[in-house]
Image (cartoon, helix red, strand yellow):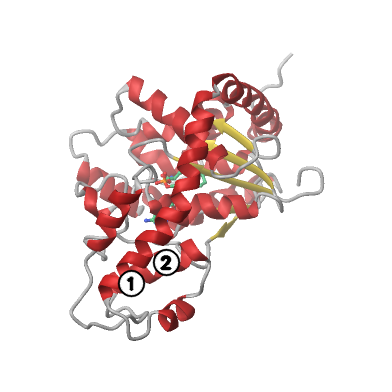
């Protein structure tokens, strides 16, 4: 609790171009939750280097992501928006938690398996212990709730297990966090292969809608979206392409899947795809405009970066000191 409010933590990687999946699965919910909780939203640049990055590019993308958080509607006076690498407590707690996490647990992580299959030439130890750094992110702020898409659930369960293990040994040190999964949009699939999640790292650019895509590109990608030969707009797993488009439409318009099915009853795929494209463009356009405006205001964004890193460091060091004492590190003199 901070000032009587429960704490929320979440983060996003500044790697690749952000997709509509990141927005609908995470960022959009963050904005909705930001009044209710004391929120920490991090640009997790330390996680990004588990895969080789171009330094100038990473710096640019990290700043763009932080700017995007503000553009999406997160008020930086109320929400702590900061770079993970600016708060050394993340790395320090991560080391300690490494010593309370089993190799077997990390071996089971599907994201590790996927990423090591994709980057066979660079299966580094950081990629393996990635979920421990994520646990440190969350536990450092004593977060009660963590809004994420479905793909991060396994990491969150590991976080809870490690926190409980630590608490069982040392007493109530960490708050045990709960995942918050949005009702719609928690798993947006690729437009070209609805069996795969929409991903920043997809080689086929038509599979993903990127947050900076212009309206024409969005419409073109939606028109090309893979559907089926059933010819009916129904929300069911036998029609994964159509189901995904219904999810996207519902998440963008705030309508339920049932209402969407009713709205398009008897209509063709072509018309539906146009409506999906328009709904997506309608939410991305204001975001892009606000982003362009903020990007020019360098001094303002700089001041947010500085102030919020200090705020995050303050709360992080409170937890870290407590943990260091528990495990037996000597007190500072
Ligand atoms: P990342 O950067 O891959 O994704 C950021 C958020 O977007 C969600 N997401 C999706 N949601 C719905 N449909 C999709 N197709 C889709 N693709 C991505 C993700 O679930 C995530 O919520 N490890 C994390 C970042 C992280 C983190 C944390 C998150 C680091 N520390 C602590 C929460 C708490 C990641 O790589 O997310």
Quarter of the figure that contains the C terminus: top right
Outermost residue toward the top in this view: 333
Residue 184 or residue 211, whichever sits in front = 211
Q: Badge 1 is on which residue?
A: 272
Q: Is mark 1 within 8 Å of ligand 1?
A: no
Which is nearer the eye, 54 or 265?
265
Counting every numbered tag in the picture gives 2
| Picture layout, residue 127 above or below residue 242 | above
Residue lying farthest bottom? 266
- Residue 52 is situated, as x and y percent measured from the top left of the image, at 28, 29
Residue ID for mark 2: 249
Q: Nearer the viewer, residue 183 or 210?
A: 210
The residue positioned 46% from the left and 68% from the top of the image is 250
Left-right relation of 145 to 281: right
Q: Is residue 151 visible to us here?
A: no
Query: Which residue in the rendered view is the most extreme toward the right?
Result: 4
| Nearer-the-camera pick, 104 or 242 | 242
Do residues under tags 2 and 1 come within 8 Å of each other at their CB atoms?
yes
- Where is residue 79? Give x, y as percent: 66, 39
Residue at figure coordinates x 57%, y 40% from the top left: 41
Residue drawn 32% across and 45% down?
Answer: 200
* Secondary structure type for disc 1: helix
Q: Pinpoint residue 100: horizontal percent, then vertical percent.
A: 51, 42
Q: Position of residue 43 (x, y in %)?
A: 49, 35
Q: Is residue 330 visible?
A: yes
Mark 2 residue crowding within 10 angstroms, few (<14) / some (14–19) / many (20+):
many
């Amino acid at each position: 609790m901070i000032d009587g409010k429960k704490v929320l933590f979440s983060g996003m990687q500044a790697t690749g171009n952000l997709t509509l999946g990141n927005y609908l699965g995470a960022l959009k919910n963050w904005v909705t939750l930001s009044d209710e909780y004391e929120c920490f939203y991090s640009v997790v640049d330390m996680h990004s280097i588990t895969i080789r990055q171009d330094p100038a590019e990473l710096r640019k993308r990290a700043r763009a992501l932080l700017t995007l958080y503000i553009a999406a509607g997160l008020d930086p006076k109320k929400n702590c928006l900061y770079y993970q690498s600016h708060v050394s407590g993340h790395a320090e707690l991560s080391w300690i938690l490494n010593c309370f996490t089993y190799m077997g647990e990390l071996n089971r992580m599907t994201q590790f398996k996927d990423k090591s299959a994709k980057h066979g030439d660079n299966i580094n130890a950081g990629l393996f212990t990635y979920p421990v750094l994520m646990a440190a992110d969350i536990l450092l702020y004593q977060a009660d709730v963590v809004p994420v898409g479905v793909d991060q659930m396994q990491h969150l369960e590991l976080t809870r297990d490690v926190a409980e293990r630590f608490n069982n040994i040392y007493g109530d040190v960490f708050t045990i966090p709960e995942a918050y999964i949005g009702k719609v949009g928690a798993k947006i699939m690729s437009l070209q292969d609805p069996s795969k999640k929409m991903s920043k790292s997809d080689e086929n650019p038509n599979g993903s809608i990127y947050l900076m895509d212009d309206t024409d590109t969005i419409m073109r990608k939606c028109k090309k979206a893979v559907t089926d030969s059933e010819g009916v707009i129904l929300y069911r797993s036998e029609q994964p392409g159509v189901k995904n488009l219904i999810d996207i439409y519902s998440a963008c318009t705030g309508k339920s899947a049932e209402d969407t099915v009713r709205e398009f009853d008897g209509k063709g795929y072509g018309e539906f795809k146009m409506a999906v494209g328009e709904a997506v463009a309608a939410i991305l356009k204001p975001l892009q405009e606000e982003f362009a405006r903020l990007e020019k205001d360098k001094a303002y964004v700089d001041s947010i970066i500085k102030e919020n890193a200090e705020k995050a460091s303050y709360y992080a060091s409170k937890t870290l000191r407590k943990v260091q004492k528990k495990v037996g590190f000597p007190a500072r003199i």
